[in-house]
Image: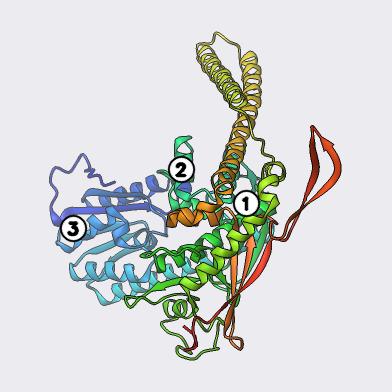
Amino acid sequence: MSAAIQSPQATTDTLQETLHIYTRVSTERQKSEGSSLETQEELGRKRAKALGFALKHWNEGDASSHHEDIATRPVLARLFAEIEAGNVKHLWVYDQSRLSRNDQVASTLRYACQKKGVTLYTKDGEFDLSNASDLLMKQMLDAFAGHENAVRMERTRFGKLNKVKLGQWHGGAATYGYSIENKKLVIRESEARWVKRIFKEVIKKTSIAKIKKLLDDNGVLPRRRGLWTIGSINAVVGNTHYDGYYEFKDHKTGEIVKVDCPRIVDNLTWVTAQQVRAESAKRQLQKNATTKHFYLLRDFMYCAHCGRAISGRRSNQGVAIYYCPNKEREWAKKGGSATPWQHGKNCGFTRSMNIEQTDKIVWDFIKSVHKNSHKLKEDVKNRVLKAHGLVVLSAEQAAKLEKDVRKLQSDHAKLSETLASLEVNHLLKKVSENVYKAMVRKLNEEMAKLDERIAHGRAEMQGASEARKWVDWLSEFGSELDKTDKLSDQGKYDYLHGLIKRIDVRCREAEKEHELTIHMQLPIIGDSIKYTGKTVHGRKEYRVLNGTDHASLKVQKKDQRGWN
């Protein structure tokens, strides 16, 4: 903020008879706790009066030492422009540090004042910067100010380091989900519940874009201004505070101090979320590499040697291969590979696989497993749904559940209206303070109970929906196995996605083949049924026996001309 204030005695503002007063404090605390700005201005006014000058006040207000550049100080920038224009001949500041503790900035200001013949006044004296002795003294004072700033920064650094070693918060705003009490982080429940929700959605593999929409739809705001962004949500998921600790690094020595803090999510949730993020990042890299063509198995396959997601490539000459992009990643990260053309170096996936051949071998195997699986026919509804806590509801049951949830939501809305009316009556003093507090507590308790019941109802509805998907999947693919070859590319992919969890691929150089270890969603490979000898409602009773959930396939070279 810049303001021009002239003394009552002055009616003109000539260049030689105006004292320009620049005032600044470095912290909000200095500004609010004392009269630093007022003191600076008062001393400047006294100097102007003693000199018989008019005055012009340039008030920067609160500008910390973190903003030392002239450009980051709007008032100083305008004053500097006036100096450069030759419109300032007399300048007063409380001391050198009011202008800047930064040596480069101080030198810039000093040179401008010297060039334009500006006389500088401080509480310690008067400096004619065109005079060699005065200039030397000013340079010495600048050096002392810079040294003082360095000492203060070092003191601040040690202070932060000592705080974290005592388990205290090092300063600044608390991380989202926390408040600061007694110099330590404590959980802020109103935010912590959304942190938990974010982790829950990540584990469910909800996209970050959908999580952002969820937060926006519920009016949840981050600490800083604006709305949540993809980056800020990712930062929440990767923040170790929520796992019960954080690390403070001293940037000068590199020392790292681990500090415990209250955990918002349990460790299993934390680890699972990180695995989901890592998997998503891997897959995204692989998708970004080749998205022009359709690849039936690419999204399932990983290199058993280095762990990278397998990529696919189709050339204009008709060559289609699956391969490990290990060396490509080396080029992207390092600008090249140490062994670009040498087989057997780095990753052991030294040879690519023919896509057509590999797709057919895996496709035929999965169809065979499906055709012979008793578990897919009998156990999906009974074992899988129960293991996930899911129940297939009839249309009538689903309608009743939805009606119950709507009733709970209506009750919740009524309580919210009651709470709002109570607030109004309290402000109008129609309700005493004690009654108001008691009612607010009771209403909040009731609303919390309803929130829990609504959440439970929604979860049950969601579970029923997931259960229906499994049944629909079984109906669509299980009963029409003979039609799978006629599915579209996307249909075939969806079909495999219901059965395959992942495929690990290992290159067998000596055997000139690739070994594919297929991990299934369910233990249906070689499953069977065992009759109990009992009859229920005229039908023989039996049990489904689990098979295994993984198997290995061999993909040999396509022809005798060598590897692809």
Question: Can residue 175 be seen from the camera position used here?
Answer: no
Mark-to-mark CA distance, 1 and 3: 52 Å
What amino acid is at disc 3?
Glu
Callout 3–callout 2 Cβ contact below 8 Å: no
Marker count (numbered):
3
**Which mark is first along the chain, 1 or 2?**
2
Q: Nearer the viewer, residue 230 or 221?
A: 230
Q: Nearer the viewer, residue 94 or 250?
A: 250
Q: Nearer the viewer, residue 284 or 390?
A: 390
Q: Position of residue 389 (x, y in %)?
A: 69, 40
Answer with left or right where residue 56 lies relative to residue 405: left
In the picture of the structure, the residue carrying the numbered disc 1 is: 242
* Residue 513, picture quadrant: bottom right
Q: Position of residue 27 (x, y in %)?
A: 45, 51
Mark-to-mark CA distance, 3 and 2: 30 Å
Q: Residue at x 39, y 61 (%)?
A: 97
In the rendered image, the vertical position of residue 349 relative to residue 367, given as above or below: below
Q: Position of residue 1 (x, y in %)?
A: 29, 46
Question: Can residue 522 be seen from the camera position used here?
Answer: yes
In the picture of the structure, the residue carrying the numbered disc 3 is: 82
Callout 1–callout 3 Cβ contact below 8 Å: no
In the rendered image, the vertical position of residue 331 relative to residue 59, given as above or below: below
What amino acid is at disc 1?
Tyr
Mark-to-mark CA distance, 2 and 1: 35 Å
At mark 3, the secondary structure is helix
In the picture of the structure, the residue carrying the numbered disc 2 is: 32
At mark 1, the secondary structure is helix
**Which mark is first along the chain, 2 or 3?**
2
Colouring style: rainbow
Q: Residue at x 65, y 54 (%)?
A: 243
